Amino acid sequence: MSASRTLYDKIVDEHRILSFGDGGGAGERLLLYIDRTVLNEYTSPQAFSGLRDAGRKPWRPEASLGVVDHVNSTNPDREAGKLDDGARRQIEYLSENGRDFGIEIFDLLDPRQGIEHVVMPELGLVLPGMVIAAGDSHSTTYGAFGVVGFGIGTSDIEHLLATQTLIYRRLKTMRITVDGRLAPGVTAKDLIMEVIRRIGADGAGGHALEFAGEAIDALGVEARMTICNMAVECGARVALMAPDDKVVDYIEGCSRAPSADLLARARADWQVLRSDPDARFDKEISLAAGDIPPMVSWGTSPDQSLAITDRVPDPETLPADRRADAVRALTYMGLTPNMALQDIAIDRAFIGSCTNARLSDLRDAASILKGRKVAPGVRAMISPGSSGVRSAAEAEGLDRIFIEAGFEWRRSGCSLCLAMNDDSLAPGERCASSTNRNFEGRQGVGGRTHLMSPAMVAAAAVSGRLADVRALAAAF
Amino acid sequence: MEHFIRLSGRVAAMPAANIDTDVIMPKAYLKGIDRSGLAAGLFHDLRFDESGGARPGFILNRPDMAETRFLLVGPNFGCGSSREHAVWGMLQYGIRGIIGSSFGAIFADNAANNGLLLLSLPPAQLAELAAGLDDGAGHMTVDLEAQRIEVAAYAGSFDIDQALRRTLMLGLDRIGETLTHADRIRSFEQAYLAARPWLMNGRGDERAS
């Protein structure tokens, strides 16, 4: 191994308990120490049952936190929210497992409940240099803190709970350098959607993807989380950004942050958490932030997206190997080639998800909605990323702006991002959505999803159709 | 888990790119606390229409495709959600091997942990296999011991990670194996946490801010 290392390799090296061989480079099999995990009610039950069946206990229960987020209702009246029998049993079983195995659980009525990837950082549980693996693909979110975060399945959750480790294969590395600054009206969401469009839905497959450059440095920590969160949609198993003072300042304000003394020691330790200047990446790409427009998706894969000013593609003009998929996507989406994206009328608007429902996202959307009304015929709802975000938004009056505009001010959960609860699209309904996946049926059987930033969802909601936020934002 | 050594059976081609785990196992089948009942959910919305009738155009619904054991798939198969239900459903339905060019990384790990064979082949070899099928279907043999794959009009060898091959053939107790290193894990953990006391901020009372 060369003396110069990438940030990813440094963190993996720090967590390597033993190597099973294959050298120290990409592909090395090793036993990896995992600092922390977060458990949800729908991917953890069989892992706990596995522990019970084998008579095993969690290795370090205090390194786990359980949160109800995927199946719960977002009804404003928490006690009245609808739950089917399966969801109810999953929620009960999570609490039961917490009790029996000594793991802290935030249940539905806990004021700290929320989407796992919003709750973990806002408590201060995500600290630079950690490895966090969790039973949800969007665990890449933690990369914004200089954390190797990645999603795992239920068998690996069980392995992690029982051993505090995973059998791990070291990834190849890739870096995307984003030069310059984003233009007004363009957000982190647009940046990551452009990256996914450009490199494809498996463009970073098999790689740990580091983001660097002036545009990344200029972003706030929440915006960085949006990018790392959605990096999984271009196949990245891990997303990473070097932690800077903004990250440490963010952690300092969190309720479970380490004490000031410890944080000062940690800050010194974290200085090394950056790729060495001459570190070699297996793949390198750069792009200019200033060229990125507000983006919307038109198809059923996150790489099927375009600038809002563009037109629905004509499959005939696409490369041969992408034509059949595009035809299928357009049929599912009910779209005609060459129609202007801004002519696509919507039925629903949704702001929520672990990608885009933090306080800064809500502020962005509210700035567009202030003094405006949701277009007739559009049902608009917002589900804040956590109960904490919801309270913070209410403290600054954002809820009033949303409600006066005609949005439903819901409780927190994964909600319409994947519609495991009673928030879902009817067949054929079309939704402008701040979420991360436009897969067939994702928001409900036959539902049609257009991904975009929260401000773009707000613009679409008041316009009744996909719209360019730059035309509505007074400041631009 | 069932061991995979050598298996022959029907293969169905599903060449679309980016078939995600939401499509493989829709949300309606994610509400259990055990692994049961997932064969019915596999590709549910592709297999069945809104009223529950079988869609005749979907390959696995064809009369000749009962007992399908292998899928020949497009790039990035199994991308998206981490739900292991997608893999459990495959096995419960009877699918034992999936042959493609690339797979969603979490799906691939889940497959390995459950004994579902995934083969990543070079595009040229994949094209030869596809060309060896008749109307998207055929008879396939995968010999993991000999690392050979065969359809009516094509036979060739394949590469596979040897650790994965061993696991698929022997079906090891992964947690039990890891726990043979328990002393190493414990001593690593003690030294690691002692050097980084800020990592102990886990549970407990919120700090007054």
Image: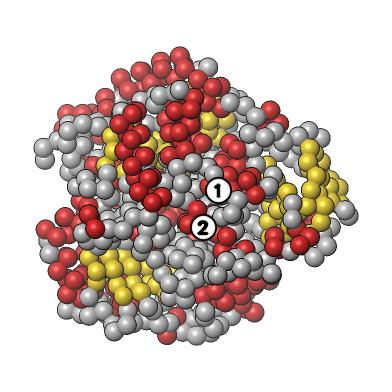
Q: What numbered label is drawn on residue B125?
A: none
Residue on which disc 2 sits:
B26
Image quarter of the C terminus of chain A? bottom left
Type of amino acid under label 2? Pro
Residue at coordinates 54% horizontally, 70% vertically from top-left?
Answer: B50
Asked if residue A67 lies left or right of residue A133, the reply is left
Asked if residue B119 lies left or right of residue A413, the reply is right
**Mark 1, other Cα within 10 Å: few <14 / some 14–19 / many ≥20:** some
Q: Of B53 and A75, which appears nearest the observer?
A: B53
Q: Which residue lies furthest to the right in this view?
A: B153
Residue at coordinates 73% horizontally, 59% vertically from top-left?
Answer: B13
Would residue B64 be visible to someone looking at this image?
yes
Where in the figure is residue A345, as x and y percent of width and height?
40, 82
Residue on which disc 1 sits:
B37
**Mark 2, other Cα within 10 Å: few <14 / some 14–19 / many ≥20:** many
Above-or-below relation of A391 to A409: above
Asked if residue B7 lies left or right of residue A236, the reply is right
Where in the figure is residue B19, as x and y percent of width and height?
59, 59
Image quarter of the N terminus of chain A? top right
Secondary element at image label 2 = loop
Above-or-below relation of B203 to B95: above
Residue at coordinates 47% horizontally, 56% vertically from top-left?
Answer: B27
Q: Of A205 and A325, which appears nearest the observer?
A: A325
Picture mark count: 2
